[in-house]
Each structure stands twice: as C-alpha cells, then as structure tokens.
Image (cartoon, helix red, strand yellow):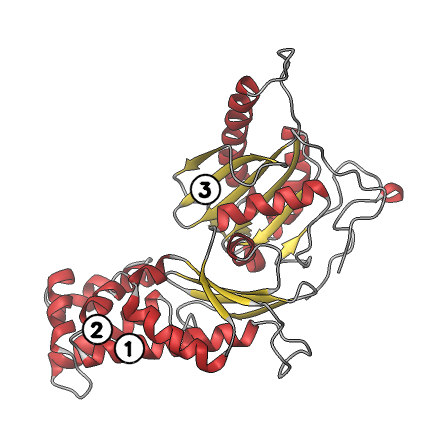
C-alpha cells in the first residue's frame, strides 16, 4: 500500500478541505476542516455534469464547482477568523467522487489537477469513482465491503491493499438486484398477468395501471425514453408494497436479495484472496435509496448474507458519498489516506506544481488493484 513519504507535509488544524459528489441528480459540494469529523457547510448545483463522446465533461464540472467552492470558502473565511481578526485556513485538499469516473473520467484526470491548482490553489487532489466515495462514507478506512443500490447496483470491497468490484455493469449487462432489475421483474409479472401467462401477478398489474395507465400502452411510453432505467426503477417500490400479500412480488424481492448478497460476498475481503477466511471485523454496509424499501427487501437480504457471509456484520451506511469524498480529502490533507490508490477507481496525482525531480507527494505510485 502506498504511504506518504517523510517529505510529505501534512496540513495542520485550521486548513480547509472540499468534498465533491457528482451524480445523476446534480453536483454537491461540502466544505470541512481537517480536524473536524463533518462538514462546515454544503451546497448543491442542481444540473448534472454532462457526459459526451469524450467522457465526463471536465469544463462543465469546473463551471459548477468553482463558483460553489469560492462561495463556501468565502463564507467560512469571513466567519472563522483568528482572535486577531485575520481569516485562517488554507484549502489543503479536494476530493471529487463522480458517477462514471472509472470508465468515463479520463478528461477529469487529465484536466482537473492543473485547473484546480490554478483556480483554488489546491495541490492535493483525489479523483474517485462514486463507489469509492460510497465506501469511504459507509465504512471509512477499514477493511470491508459496501453495496451501493439505487437504479443500479454495485458492490465494492477492500482489504486496504486492493479493490474488489462486483457488478455495476448497467441495466443491460448486470445491476442485478438493483432498482431497475426489481422494477423490470415487477413489470414483467404485471404484463404476464395482463396476457394470462404463468408467473403473472394481478396485484402488480393493478399497480402498473395505477402508475402508468393501460398495460398495452406501456411500450409506447417506455421505449422512446432515454431514461428508461430510472423509469423502470420507479416501479420497484410498488413491488415492495405488494410483497406482503403477493407471492410473486415477494419472490422477486427474494431473488433480488440473493443477487445483492452474491455481489457482497464476491468483494468482502478475505485473508488469502478468493476462498480464504473472511478478514476479522470486516463488515458489509448498505447504502443508497434501494434499501429504503425496508423489510420487504432487507429481511430476505439479511438471511442471504447470513448464509453466504456468516459472522459478518451488516450495517446501514454511516455516511453518504459526499461524506466519503470529504473523508478522503481530510485523509489526503493529513497524509493518512489508507484506501488503496488505483489509476481509475481512486486516482491521486502528484501534487500539482512540483517538478519530476521533487515528486514527494501522495499518489506518485498508483496501485492497480
């Protein structure tokens, strides 16, 4: 595991850090201090960062991030001053977590270090996949695993030497057990009831009609939309609502729980790689809107996890991906970032502004996981 060399100078108390969470619902920014456990202030930019043929649009992210960061820093510097009245604190580190960072983040990794150093004077930067910031928010810097569930689903685990990932491949190739998977299974059962085929659920057909209108009109409503996964996932809570009295809906959630538990088991750290004993004290944290469906999903999921990962603790995430980004920034600022570096999952470039001969920063060696 890469550790900060002795020449690395950790930031002292009073230094500011920024955490950024870029997702489908917009850009969120949190300002904190290295000595404090939580944010001083947060702000939200409602427009999601654009993604084009070249990947995530670094310019569009900067257009939203820089004004938000300056506003937060300005407010904090104006209210947190030294006894003599002078503003205290520097921006010691910044961490950006973004959906699609691992596969679509090349422009961010190329353009952000220099742009943020020039605009904000920050040289310590981490660029992370949103699954990594979800992990940091849920588990911190301990060995374990996190399952992040929403429209899609991804599991991520680490023993603090490398990352293990399962699923997160999108609604066409995976995301098994996620919101779109559950919603699609529920709509399939509803359409089977409409046709009179085996496996149909009259209860789910009734909910389909209440939510979308006539069943035969659903293809025309659904197929032309570019946000089909989200629309399909919007039916997942209807499946959960029917599960108490409908065997088909309950079966869908049991199957989803099996997929989720399998993903968690695939990434939970072991002492000797695949097939080894589970790392002592490792836990599985659940995060994301999927798990707000409650007991209809959580009940069978606990049973499946107990079967596949006996003795492993299962918890609800203590913090969200924005909390995770702030934690990564704090750890980077103090020289205590223990999560494994990775060229795309957790990219920590050299401190911007140092020449090759003086490269002493965290992140000069990227672990490939």
What is the CA distance from the residue labelled 1 to the residue labelled 3?
33 Å
- Residue at 18% of width from left, 70% of height from top? 242
Q: Position of residue 8 (x, y in %)?
A: 80, 42
Of pointers 2 and 1, the one earlier in the residue sequence: 2
Q: Report the disc number at residue 252.
A: 1
Q: Report the disc number at residue 222.
A: none
What is the CA distance from the residue labelled 2 to the residue labelled 1?
9 Å
Element assignment for label 2 = loop
Residue on which the image places disc 2? 243
Quadrant hosting residue 162: bottom right
Locate the N terminus and report the quarter of the image it occupies: bottom right
Quadrant hosting residue 239: bottom left
Q: Position of residue 45 (x, y in %)?
A: 42, 37
- Is the Cβ of the residue at disc 2 closer than 8 Å to that at disc 1? yes
Of pointers 2 and 3, the one earlier in the residue sequence: 3
Residue on which the image places disc 3? 27
Q: Position of residue 331 (x, y in %)?
A: 66, 46
């Amino acid at each position: 595991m890469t550790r900060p060399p002795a020449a690395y100078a950790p930031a002292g108390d009073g230094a500011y850090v920024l955490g950024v969470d870029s997702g489908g619902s917009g850009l969120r920014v949190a300002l904190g201090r290295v000595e404090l456990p939580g944010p001083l202030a947060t702000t939200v930019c409602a427009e999601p960062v654009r993604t084009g043929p070249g990947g995530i649009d670094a310019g569009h992210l900067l257009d939203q991030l820089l004004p938000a960061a300056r506003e937060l820093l300005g407010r904090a510097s104006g209210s947190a001053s030294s006894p003599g009245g002078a503003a205290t604190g520097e921006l010691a580190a910044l961490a950006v977590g973004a959906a699609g960072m691992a596969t679509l983040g090349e422009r961010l990794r190329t353009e952000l270090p220099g742009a943020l150093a020039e605009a904000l004077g920050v040289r310590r930067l981490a660029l992370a996949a949103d699954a990594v910031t979800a992990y940091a928010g849920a588990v911190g810097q301990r060995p374990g695993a996190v399952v992040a569930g929403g429209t899609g689903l991804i599991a991520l685990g680490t023993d603090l030497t490398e990352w293990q990932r399962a699923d997160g491949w999108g609604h066409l190739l995976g995301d098994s057990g996620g919101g779109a998977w559950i919603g699609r299974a529920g709509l399939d059962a509803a359409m089977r009831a409409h046709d009179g085929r085996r496996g149909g659920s009259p209860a789910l057909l009734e909910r389909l009609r209440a939510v979308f209108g006539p069943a035969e009109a659903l293809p025309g409503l659904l197929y032309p939309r570019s946000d089909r996964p989200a629309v399909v996932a919007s039916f997942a809570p209807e499946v959960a609502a029917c599960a108490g009295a409908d065997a088909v809906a309950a079966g869908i959630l049991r199957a989803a729980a099996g997929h989720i538990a399998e993903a968690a088991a695939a990434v939970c750290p072991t002492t000797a790689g695949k097939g080894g004993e589970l790392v002592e004290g490792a836990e599985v944290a659940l995060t994301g809107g999927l798990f707000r469906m409650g007991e209809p999903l959580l009940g069978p999921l606990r049973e499946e996890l107990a079967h596949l990962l006996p003795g492993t603790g299962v918890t609800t995430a203590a913090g969200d991906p924005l909390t995770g980004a702030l934690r990564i920034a704090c750890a980077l600022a103090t020289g205590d970032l223990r999560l494994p570096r990775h060229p795309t999952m957790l990219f920590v470039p050299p401190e911007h502004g140092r020449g090759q001969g003086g490269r002493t920063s965290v992140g000069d060696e990227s672990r490939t996981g």
